[in-house]
Image (cartoon, rainbow, N blue to C red):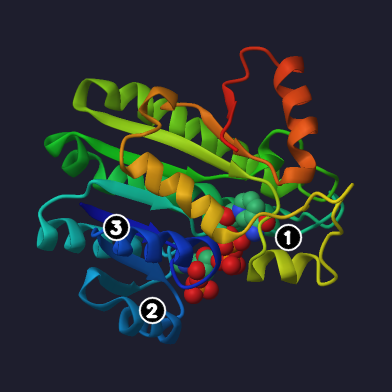
Amino acid sequence: MIAIVTGASTGIGAAVAKQLVKAGHTVVGIARNTEKLAALARALGDGFLPHPCDVTDAQVFSAVLRQVADDLGRVDLLVNNAGSAKVLSIGETTPAEFRAMHELNVVAPANAIHTLWSTMCRHGDARIVNMSSLAQLDPFPGFFAYASAKSALHLLTVVANAEGEAHGVRAFTVAPGVVDTPLHRSLMPDGIKPVDGLSSTLLPNEVADVVVAIAQGRHDARAGRVLAMPAPAAVTALRRWIIEHPGGGVELVI
Ligand SMILES: NC(=O)c1ccc[n+]([C@@H]2O[C@H](COP(=O)([O-])OP(=O)(O)OC[C@H]3O[C@@H](n4cnc5c(N)ncnc54)[C@H](OP(=O)(O)O)[C@@H]3O)[C@@H](O)[C@H]2O)c1
């Protein structure tokens, strides 16, 4: 299987790339940090193909994706994982901040889907994973830009899944709670304490497990939906959210 993983240099994306390569798949890893991608390539061997690029540079990103599709002949899995979050009050969310958050978290994934669409539809049996966040369901103050971008990202999933059905292309939204990554540590340097002995964070590998399961078709019945992954301390709250929002298209996968 040929997979493209954006944001592969660290955090969740690096964990996804490692697990996919270990499972025998070829992974094209995209991120800006050339050294981190090269280090991963040394560790993972021939199965990992680094392609440094800024996904918010639409022209360059499209050109890289087209080249990869031409060189490798097909794309079976696209993981739109590159993303970032800032905690900004509405007063701090200038149009420039809002636009930048949406460029990275939703416009770049839309560009990737658009660019690879004909290749994925032509070959069929392809999957798209959009890495959202539980913030799309229950955002806290400060996520005006981030939560709206992730919510829009999920709608890319819904439309791509509907339009892809006739071509064997399925799309999924994965929405983790807090994951212990460099992004989380930059937002919350002191971490989050466990609640009643239950961890408030997930590990990148736990999210990667779900992406690999999607790649292997094990979540096909959930295509078009939000695969929600709360940390253990947040499972009860998420169960309540699902009961309070019937038809919300959210399924617990932990
Ligand atoms: N950590 C959490 O608590 C959490 C929870 C829910 C959802 N998520 C989502 O999970 C995804 C991964 O987050 P993470 O926690 O693993 O964050 P991370 O450790 O900061 O990793 C983010 C990845 O995105 C890449 N990236 C950022 N901007 C980019 C750009 N302009 N062009 C190309 N690559 C770019 C980074 O690589 P370079 O810097 O090398 O470009 C890095 O590989 C994000 O979409 C995030 O919103 C995270």
* Front label number (3 vs 1): 3
Q: Which mark is residue 53?
A: none
* Front label number (2 vs 1): 2
Which residue is labeled 1 in the image? 86
- Marks 2 and 3 sit apart, C-alpha to C-alpha, by 16 Å
Q: Disc 2 vs disc 1: Cβ atoms closer than 8 Å?
A: no
Residue 150 vertical position relative to residue 92 in the rendered view, above or below: above
Secondary structure of the residue carrying numbered label 1: loop
Residue 156 appears in the picture as rendered: yes
Query: Is residue 174 found left or right of 30 in the rendered image?
Result: right
Residue 33 vertical position relative to residue 90 in the rendered view, above or below: below
Quadrant of res 234: top right
Residue extending farthest to the top is: 246
- Marks 2 and 1 sit apart, C-alpha to C-alpha, by 27 Å
Residue pictured at 57% horizontal, 21% vertical? 249
Q: Under 8 Å from ligand 1: the CB of mark 1?
A: no
Which residue is labeled 3 in the image? 23
Identity, as a three-letter code, of the amino acid under mark 2 = Leu
Q: Residues within 10 Å of mark 2 (few under 14, many from 20)?
A: many
Q: Disc 2 vs disc 3: Cβ atoms closer than 8 Å?
A: no
Residue pictured at 75% horizontal, 56% vertical? 94
Secondary structure of the residue carrying numbered label 2: helix
Residue pictured at 31% horizontal, 24% vertical? 163
Which residue is labeled 2 in the image? 40
**x, y (%) of residue 129?**
42, 43
Secondary structure of the residue carrying numbered label 3: loop
Quadrant of res 159: top left
Query: Is residue 248 found left or right of 18 in the rendered image?
Result: right
